[in-house]
Amino acid sequence: MSNQIGSEPGKAHESVPRLRIKNLSDLIFGLALSIGALTLISEKPTSLLQIAYSLVYFAFAFYVLATVWVRYSRIMSVLPIETGPIIAINLVLLFLVSIEPYLYNLMIGSSNAPPPSQLYLGTTTSLWAADMGSIMLILAFFSHELAREERKLIPEKLLRNYRFLTYASLISGALFFASILPIFWSFTIFGIQSRFLLWAGFAVVFVVRRFVEWRTKN
């Protein structure tokens, strides 16, 4: 059938059309990105400082999810995803993306709620870090599959770029998982938990990756 893209003969019943997977992923990423904006609407800040904090929190969450979506979309536009274990791993990724807004909102709380305890904050930030670390490791797996020369899924000139993407995703995942260690919650730098500083490394890793790609082309 025409909608069984990439399926093997005799295995059509195992195939899921690429378009349906794409529609599902676009829906989940779109909802995840928009929930943060809905949370902002429900907030009733009482000062300019609270407004600034809310916008910063939303901007960070939006940046992380948007970056994941861009890399995910580029990978899935090439990687065969209609059959086999790739579907299962893809669904796990989409589940992790769908719960990210929930965990993030638990973590930042509400400006109208009483200040949460350190134990509560430590637990919720650990859960969010574990969620994001898992997402990054799955992206690393997908990009690694594309970078395998024997599969010939992408032009040879792009192999190096996807290898860099694999390394960047692995390092980002490692940073998120490392941040779960209690020492990164108890140790502060200028009053900021080092756990949050490790999360900022997510942006640094991909900037460095872009720079390395640019330098290797010249």
Image (tube, helix red, strand yellow):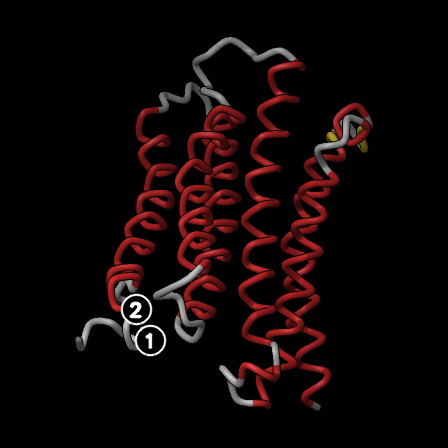
The residue sitting at 45% across, 20% down in the picture is 110
Disc on res. 167: none
Residue 160, how many percent across, how many down? Answer: 65, 81
Residue 77, how many percent across, how many down? Answer: 39, 72
Residues 33 and 168: in front is 168
The residue sitting at 38% across, 37% down in the picture is 36
Per the image, label 2 sits on a secondary structure element best described as: loop
Residues 19 and 41: in front is 19
Question: Residue pushed farthest top?
Answer: 114
Measured Cα–Cα span from mark 2 to mark 1: 5 Å
Residue 16, how many percent across, how many down? Answer: 28, 62
Residue 12, how many percent across, how many down? Answer: 25, 68
Q: Which residue is mark 1?
A: 8
The residue sitting at 31% across, 73% down in the picture is 7
Instruction: Say left or right for 179 vs 42.
Output: right
As drawn, 109 above or below 210: above
As drawn, 174 above or below 86: above
Residues 4 and 133: in front is 4
The C terminus is located in which quarter? Answer: bottom right
The residue sitting at 66% across, 14% down in the picture is 119
Residue contact between numbered discs 2 and 1, judged by CB atoms under 8 Å: yes
> Crowding at label 1, few (<14), some or many (≥20) Cα neighbours within 10 Å?
few
Amino acid type of the residue tagged 1 in the rendering: Glu
Disc on res. 11: 2
> Crowding at label 2, few (<14), some or many (≥20) Cα neighbours within 10 Å?
few
Quadrant in which residue 21 is drawn: bottom left
Amino acid type of the residue tagged 2 in the rendering: Lys
Per the image, label 1 sits on a secondary structure element best described as: loop
